[in-house]
Amino acid sequence: MENTQKTISAEKIVYHQAFDPDTYMNDIALIKLQKPAELNKFVRAVCLPSQDGGDLAIPGKYGYATGWGYTKAREDSYSNTLQYTSFTIQSNSVCRYSTSYPYFPRVMFCAGDGGGKKGSCYGDAGGAFVREEKRGDGYRWVVTGIDSWGEACVQRNKYGYYTRVYSYIDWINKTVREN
């Protein structure tokens, strides 16, 4: 463990009550930490989408995906360093027709370069997909998606699929209030 890393145990994990492991519908959970994380230059917070700001999963726009997953499709170990890459959010038609699995655009979106050069991989699930949004006088990073699933790592015409966080703002707020 690096000297910049801290371990904080979970006090409670709340999974979405309607999560379907066969389709990844409602693939979202919240973790309540046993103690607050100390923010510093290595530990930062990310904002939730605002109801007024709208959904930032806009086709054609870039975002950044983060994760601890494999850095190559044929690897068999996770990264020791948090990785990130940027790529484009795809249209619902691209997302729907580039997979044989069910796609639910109300609660999912897909992103990637489609050219087999950049994308998420095994072990990245749960990582954030963020975009910058103007808030007040400055810009803030906003979690737009949560890495959920994909059929292949960085393959041509394949994309990573993300839980659309904006669709769950009411569930997140209610769950936080109740816990």
Image (tube, rainbow, N blue to C red):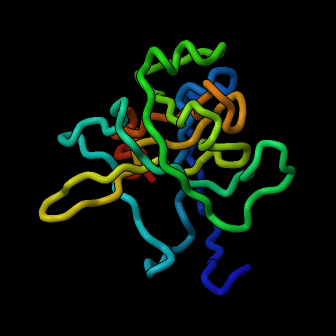
Q: Position of residue 38 (x, y in %)?
A: 47, 79
**Residue 90: percent from the left, percent from the top?**
44, 28
Query: Residue 10 appears in which quarter of the rendering?
Result: bottom right
At horizontal 73% and vertical 67% (from top left) the residue drawn is: 80
Q: Would residue 16 be seen by someone viewing this image from the given angle?
A: no
Position of residue 106 relative to residue 82, above or below, is above
Q: Quadrant of the N terminus?
A: bottom right
Residue at 45% in and 14% down: 93
- Among the 4 quarters of the image, the one containing residue 120: top right
Q: Is residue 109 left or right of residue 147?
A: left
Observer-nearest of 164 and 67: 67
Q: Is residue 28 above or below residue 5?
A: above
- Horizontal placement of 130 versus 42: left or right? left
Relative image position of residue 106 (x, y in whole percent): 40, 22
Q: Nearer the viewer, residue 90 or 12?
A: 90
- Residue at 49%, 18% in the rendered image: 94
Q: Residue at x 18, y 40 (%)?
A: 52
Residue 111 vertical placement versus 7 (above, below) = above
